[in-house]
Image (cartoon, grey):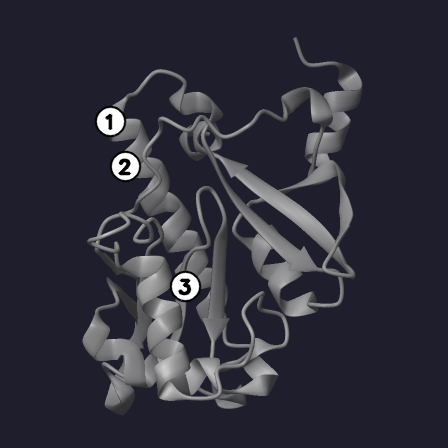
Amino acid sequence: MASEDDHALVENGILPLSKVKDYPSHIRFRPPPLILTPRLRLRYAIEDDIPVIHTFLAQEETMKFMYSKVSLSLADSERWYKSRFVKDPVTGTGGGDFIYLICLRDGDAEGKPIGTAGSRGAPQLGYQIGAGPQYWGKGYGSEAIGAIIQGICQTIRAEKQEGWEDAYVQVKIEDDNIGSLKVAEKVGMKKFEDGCRIEYGKLIIEYRYYVRDSLA
């Protein structure tokens, strides 16, 4: 049973350690291939999208908070894409992640790709609005991540596998990435009581959203 201290932590947007469990590995972590929001169209990226994805990966400004390095060539971006999203027919490795192309739905720019969002390996998500600063600060990141989280939750709830209540979505954010910290909180994710750690020499804040919370 949750303690009064646990309830106080949750009310303050912090996930107490008493509620923290590892992601159940048998639960499938994959949202639907197409998601529509009021302003965005999210679809699984395909190999034909590599050139536009490269334009995002090649920008130092939009890559500074990403775990991946800035892509120096189209060939680098192709290798990055295939290593994560295409299963190797010989080794059977790769292909475990998913990536959406974030496209606009409104006005003259309808269909324009402005970024990517997807899995860095279950249960972690990441996103990037890489089409330029003119698309920052407009809520596109929270709109995309919020929709993907709900898509994942709906898929997991529908499959009703044992232990689904302990499945969750996770993001890891550098402490000076103020925009993404706001996105995590805006979409209802909870910060760990012990969610600060050093990774790759940087202070990282970790947030989770549990599938069971999508029923609240």
Above or below 81: residue 20: above
Q: Earlier in the sequence, mark 2 or mark 3?
A: 3
- In this image, 59 relative to 175: left or right? left
Q: Distance between the residues labelled 2 and 3?
A: 18 Å
Seen from this angle, which residue lies furthest front? 90
Circle 2 — which element? Answer: helix
Pick the front one: 178 or 174: 174
Q: In which quarter of the image is the N terminus?
A: top right
Report the residue marked by disc 3: 117
The disc label shown at residue 14, or none: none
Circle 1 — which element? Answer: helix
Q: Residue 136: horizontal and vertical position, in percent?
A: 53, 80
Residue 39 can be seen in this image? no
Report the residue marked by disc 2: 155
- In this image, 134 relative to 107: left or right? right
Q: Distance between the residues labelled 2 and 1?
A: 6 Å
Report the residue marked by disc 1: 159
Q: Are marks 2 and 3 in contact (CB under 8 Å)?
A: no
Q: Do the residues labelled 2 and 1 touch (CB within 8 Å)?
A: yes
Q: What residue type is labelled 3?
A: Ala
Q: Residue 91: horizontal and vertical position, in percent?
A: 28, 50
Residue 12 picture quarter:
top right
Q: Residue 165: horizontal and vertical position, in percent?
A: 44, 22
Q: Distance between the residues labelled 3 and 1?
A: 23 Å
Circle 3 — which element? Answer: strand
Residue at x 23% of width, y 49% of height: 32
- In this image, 118 relative to 107: left or right? right
Residue 55 can be seen in this image? yes
Q: Residue 208: horizontal and vertical position, in percent?
A: 57, 41
Q: Earlier in the sequence, mark 3 or mark 1?
A: 3
Residue at x 75% of width, y 31% of height: 9
Q: What residue type is labelled 2?
A: Thr
